[in-house]
Image: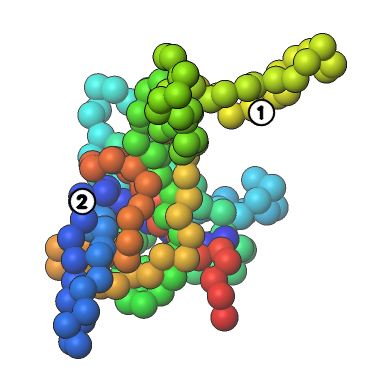
Amino acid sequence: MSLGLIGTKLGMTRVFKEDGDSIPVTVVGVEPHRITALKSESRDGYSAIAVTMGKSKEEKLSAPIRGVYEKAGVEPGRGLWEFRVDAEEAESYKVGDRVDVSLFNEGQKVDVKGTSIGKGFTGVMKRYSFGGGRATHGNSKAHRKPGSIGQNQTPSRVFPGKKMAGHSGNATRVQQNLEIVKIDLERKLLLIKGSIPGSRQSDIIVTKAAKQKS
């Protein structure tokens, strides 16, 4: 576990290497973070770093949340996030410190967490890539149906977890071991190879890869 960044998914583009190869990348905007609290094993039972970023609407802040910012002496942000870290890393920061895209390095592997695009209620062909029924030869109004969903009199029920039509998307997903192709310090951007979960302008969380291959 280590400190990460909260970014905004801005869209996709591509980066050309010196040999002319094209690399598809997702552009992530990252505003500077402000540390609002440091959690410790002795006081809180775990080590963590709490951060905020952006600007909040003062009229929407509750009294307890406003107190968190006043205690830390930092400008209120549009949210509070915590990152579990080891005690040594927590001690290397202090409340009020700022963190930006320089936290990562080009070529580093990261995990990206986001909320996938919601698709509403979908059938099994779109939700699970079922093949569907035959197009002709006696098929009547069953072209996109799932087929048999149960057994006979025994066990006389549909087993839990059966793949059926239902709500699709709008779920938390983590894309692992993605490479940071480029870091733009001036424009506060991370260019991450490949696609990441979420729609444009959605919040994503970038952390050091938990399963990085040696």
**Disc 2 element:** strand
Q: Residue 207: give x, y in percent of width and height.
A: 45, 59
Q: Residue 187: give x, y in percent of width and height.
A: 15, 63
Looking at the rendered image, the quarter that the N terminus falls into is: bottom right
Q: Residue 34: give x, y in percent of width and height.
A: 34, 52
C-alpha distance separating marks 1 and 2: 34 Å
Report the side of 164 relative to 26 (left or right). right
Residue 55's image quarter?
top left
Q: Mark 2 points at which residue?
A: 11
Q: Residue at x 56, y 54 (%)?
A: 84
Q: Residue at x 33, y 61 (%)?
A: 194
Residue 184's image quarter?
bottom left
When the figure is inspected, residue 6 is found, relative to residue 131, above or below; the finding is below
Instruction: Give the total number of marks visible in the rendering.
Output: 2
Between residue 165 and residue 142, name the one nearer to us: 142
Q: Name the residue under label 1.
A: 161
Residue type (three-letter) at the residue carrying disc 1: Gly
Residues at circles 1 and 2 in contact by the CB criterion of under 8 Å: no
Q: Residue at x 45, y 55 (%)?
A: 175
Visible residue check, residue 67: no
Looking at the rendered image, the quarter that the C terminus falls into is: bottom right
Pick out the residue farthest to the front. 137
Residue 18's image quarter?
bottom left
Between residue 114 and residue 37, name the one nearer to us: 114
When the figure is inspected, residue 129 is found, relative to residue 26, above or below; the finding is above
**Disc 1 element:** loop
